[in-house]
Image (cartoon, rainbow, N blue to C red):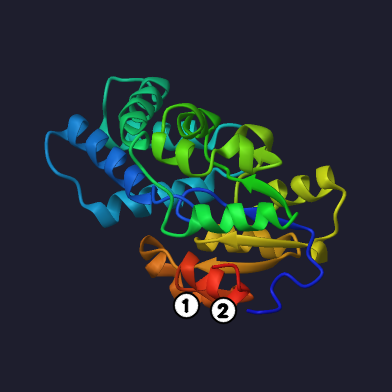
Amino acid sequence: MERLLAGKRAVLFDLDGTLVDSIGVWNEADERLARELTGSAPDRAEIRALREGALRRFRGEPEPYYCYCALLKERYGTDLTARQLQQRRQAIAAELLERVDYRPGADVLLRALKGRGYALALATTGRRSSLDIYRRKNKNIMEKAPIDRVFDRVYTCEDVGRIKPDPEVYLRAMADMGLRAEQCLVFEDSLAGVQAAKAAGIETVAVYERHSDPDREAINALADWQAADHPAVLAALGLG
């Protein structure tokens, strides 16, 4: 990994799961929503599989998360509209997102790269409303490495027509920065994210995240590098 940054001018990061420890938040939000709708505890693995399958299925739609909530309406037979379900899901998640934190060492890595002159871009296909919580309400993130201070460019699902594993968010970031794929490096944690980065032609580091374990073999086969965590990246790059 010592040659990771050779010839690189920009480093692009996924957010949820890669930089911040938030994947469990979305699992919990969906579990709470399902419990409200059914009155019983849902199967966690089933909830995760349903969401991830829906996002793959609807990644080319203008509002993939709305389509996911429409699927929830059909599944649970609720009188709530898909839009109402989406709003309720966001309300549940908003409370939880205020308390999440950077993964250990992630903020240190960001500050170190920024201090050495690399352009940093955040390329998430999560919603802007969620990112705004991190920007304005989450004290952990605001105090350690404020998003608008650290990143030169920020992209959410509202900035693209297709979400990961489509490479659009990474292709747009490169075009906006005027850079070629070989001048960039991506950090991701999920299979969809790694697929998106590799489809854009960018070298990719897969940072271990336990919620991605079902896809571990595929992630490791596709990514150029694997890292156990951010302290391991810092040590490998001599930035710790």
Q: Is residue 10 above or below residue 140?
A: below
Q: Residue at x 68, y 34 (%)?
A: 159
Q: Is residue 154 left or right of residue 221?
A: right
Quadrant in which the C terminus is drawn: bottom right
Q: Residue at x 52, y 40 (%)?
A: 126
Locate residue 5, reporting x and y percent: 72, 69
User: Residue 6: in sight, yes or no?
Assistant: yes
Pointer 2 with pointer 1, Cβ within 8 A = yes
Quadrant in which the N terminus is drawn: bottom right
Q: Is residue 91 left or right of residue 215?
A: left
Q: Residue at x 36, y 43 (%)?
A: 100
Q: Residues within 10 Å of mark 1 (few under 14, many from 20)?
A: few
Q: Is residue 41 left or right of residue 125?
A: left
Amino acid type of the residue tagged 2 in the rendering: Ala
Q: Which residue is mark 2?
A: 221
Amino acid type of the residue tagged 1 in the rendering: Glu
